[in-house]
Amino acid sequence: MGRAVRDTRLDTREARLRLAVRKEPYWRLISEGAHLGYYRGERVGKWVARFRKTGGSGGYLKATLGEADDIRNADGESILTFKQADEAARLWFEAKVRGDRKAGPYTVGDALDDYLANFDRKSLDGTRLRIEALIRPALGEVDANALTTKQISDWHRARAATAARLRTGKRREQQLRPLDDDESKRRRKSTANRDLTVLKAALNEAYRKGKIRSDEAWRKVKPFAKVEGVKLRYLSDDEVRRLVNAVDVDIRPLVQAALLTGARYGELGAIKVQDVDLSAGTVWMMDTKAGKPRVAYLESEGLSLFTQASAGKKGHEIVFSRPDGQPWKSSQQGRRLRDACVKANISPPAGFHDLRRTYGARLAVRGVPMAVIAEALGHADDRVTRRHYAHLAPSYVADTVRAHAAGLGIVEASNLVKLTAEPNKTVAG
C-alpha cells in the first residue's frame, strides 16, 4: 500500500480548522482507487475512507474511520490523529483487497454496493443514478448497524422538500423546478417515496444476508401517503392532430409512433429495422421496461410510418434516430413536446408518456377488452389497465344509470354548442 502520506491541509489540527465547512470530504490519494478523506462539519470533523478495486464498478466503497482530533485529544480508537487515520485507512484498504469487511464497519454505502452488484432488473442504470446522486451522498458513510429511524426519516423528508432538477446546459447554473403548487409537491413526495424504496431494498437485502443485525430503523419509516394518484391525462383526436402538426420535424416520427403503438419513449428509441416485420404488420419491442420483449400490432397508418422510417436502412440500424443518425437520449423529448403543446394550444402540456395513455384511451373508448389493451401496452396483468382505462370503456352500469336517472327537467335547454379550438386561437362563447 506504500508509505505513509503527508498533507499540509490535513496533518495538523490547526490546518484542518482553517478549511471551509462543506459536504464533500477533502480527499488525499493513498494509492490507486484508495483515498483518505477528512470531512469538515460545522461541529465536528471526521476521518473517512473510500476504495474502489482496479477495474471495479458500482462506485466507491466508503467507511467512517473515526472522529478527528480537532477538539478532543486522540485516543487511538474513536478519535484519531491524521497519522492514526492513515494507518486505519490502510488496514481497511487491505481488508477490501482481501474481500474482508470485518476490519471496518459495514456501511450503508457497502449495502448499496452489494445491492447494485446483485441487481439483475431492467432499471439498473436508473437505480444506480438514484443511488449515486441522491442516497449515497447523504447516508453512504453511515454505519448500517448504527443507522437510526430519525436519520432515514430526516433524509426522506428532505428529499420531498428539495426542488426537482431540470435539464441544464453545460457550465450553466443548475436549474430547478419550483415547488409552488400542490401538484409539484405531490410529485416530489412521490419521487421521495421511490428513493426510499431503493434504500429499503438495499438494506433489506443486507439484513437478509446477516450483514445488518436489525431492520427496525428503516421498517418504522413509512412512505408519504396518498401521493401516487393515477394520472388520467390523454389527448383527444383533435389535440393529437394539432400536436403532430406542431412538433419539430426531427422528432415527429417518434411522436407519431408513440400515438400509433402505445410504446414508451425508450422502447421506441431502441427499435431496429430488423425488429420490424412489414409483411405481418408487427414490431418487436426488444428493450422494454419489464425486460420481456413484446409485439406491437400496426394498422394502416402505423404500417405506413414504419415503412417510411425504415426505408434505405440496414437491419442493425435504429428506425427512429436523430437527424445525425444517433439514438435519442434520455430527456431529449421533453422540451420539444412542451414547445409543440404551446404552439398547438394544448393545455396543460402533454408529456411523452401521455401519448402512450392516449393510445390506451382510444382503444378503451372503442370497446376493446381490458385484457387486450393490457397485452398491447405490455402490462403484467389487466389490473393496472383497468385502473387507468376502465372508466372510459362502454359500460352497462353507466348506460343504465344515465337511462334511469334522466328526466327531472330542472335545467333549461340551451343552444350552446361545443366548438373545437384551432391552434393558438381561443373560442369565444
Image: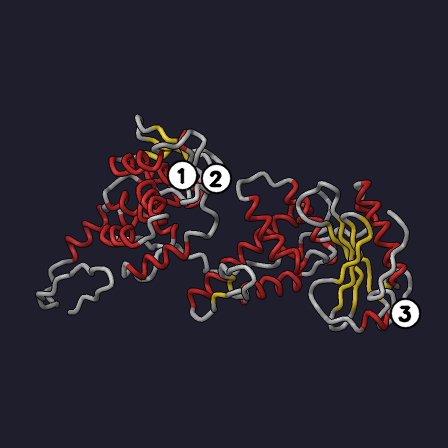
Residue 56 vertical position relative to residue 28 in the rendered view, above or below: above
What SS does tag 2 mark? Answer: loop
Instruction: Name the residue tied to disc 1.
Output: 378
Find residue 181 and report its image quarter: bottom left
Mark 2 neighbour density, 10 Å: few (under 14) some (14–19) many (20 or more): few
Residue 333 makes an appearance in the image: yes
Near-viewer residue (15 or 211): 15
Q: Which x, y percent locates residue 114?
A: 68, 44
Residue that mark 3 sits on: 73
Q: Residue at x 87, y 71 (%)?
A: 72
Local SS, label 3: loop
**Which of marks 2 and 1 precedes in the sequence?**
2
Q: Are marks 1 and 2 in contact (CB under 8 Å)?
A: yes
Question: What amino acid is labelled 1 in the image?
Answer: Gly
Which numbered disc flags the more N-terminal residue, 1 or 3? 3
Quadrant containing the C terminus in the rendered view = bottom left
Q: Amino acid at mark 3?
A: Asn
Mark-to-mark CA distance, 1 and 2: 8 Å
Q: Is residue 189 visible?
A: no
What residue sits 77% from the left and 71% below the top? Answer: 19
